[in-house]
Amino acid sequence: MDIIYGTNSVRQSLEANRVKKLVITYDFNNEEILKLAAEKKVVIERVTKKELDGFARGKNSQSCMAYIIPYKLYSLDEILNNPTKNENRIIAILDELTDPNNLGAIIRSAEIFNVEALIYKKTNSVSLSPLVAKISSGAINYIKCCEVTNLSRSIEKIKENSFWVYGLDGNAKMHIQDLDKNRNICLVIGSEGKGISRLVRENCDDLVKIPQLGHTPCLNASNAAAIAFYELRRK
């Protein structure tokens, strides 16, 4: 089983029926979590703060952690062939994102703005982890994540399934608000520092940018993703 920690992650996982065992300190008194654990009939173990800090390996556990059912990774076919009820579908590709804090934040934004799935490479990319789960504040329970071997081939399949693929690039000519939103969109978000790789960029239908008014050269990947997801859902 996987381990998560932090009150938001634990609460969301309890609500999603993923928790098998809850570990808390003797003085933990979050009534919402304790009530949920009782309702779900989850086994509770109380330990000292020192013991819990040892489990969390120095991370801020907020006095609680949980053993959970492992997160499911979806295949690309499962994502493409099982759409939500959204009239216009949105999915996203993360091109060699390596920072777990960015991945967790992007998962959180994706869930808030009803992005169906996140797709990333099995190699040279960050994957799901307790830290990612904590940063996502529980949104990891509701977002489909897919690991693929080759992003370029995945983009070809995505296009075959009636998606338009747009790369997010600060040097693009088109503004993201000018996109036709009455279509299925796959948004490609590049890695920290390097942006979108050449082959992936060449396979995009077009590149779009978020207009910037200040002097800072670029946005953090997770900040850019949040703004882009909001814009794609804005009518």
Image (cartoon, rainbow, N blue to C red):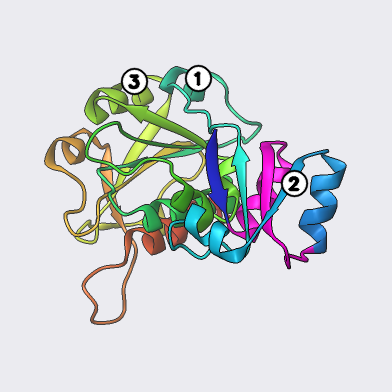
Q: What numbered label is drawn on residue 157?
A: 3
Q: Is residue 82 above or below residue 36?
A: above
| Percent coordinates x, y for residue 117 in the rendering | 49, 36
Residue at 16% x, 43% y: name it: 197
Circle 2 is placed at which residue position?
44
Numbered disc 2: secondary structure: strand
Residue at 78% x, 66% y: name it: 29
Which image quarter is the C terminus in? Answer: bottom right
Pair 1/2: label in front: 2
Which image quarter is the N terminus in? Answer: top right
| Percent coordinates x, y for residue 180 in the rendering | 44, 45
The residue closer to the viewer here, 13 or 151, is: 13
Number of other residues with Cα within 10 Å of mark 3, as a class: few under 14, some 14 to 19, many 20 or more = some
Magenta residue span? 6-30
Task: Check residue 10 for magenta coloring.
Answer: yes
Q: Is residue 30 above or below residue 152?
A: below
* Cα separation between marks 2 and 3: 45 Å
Q: Quick one: label 1 or label 2, which is nearer the N terminus?
A: 2
In the image, what residue type sits under mark 3? Lys
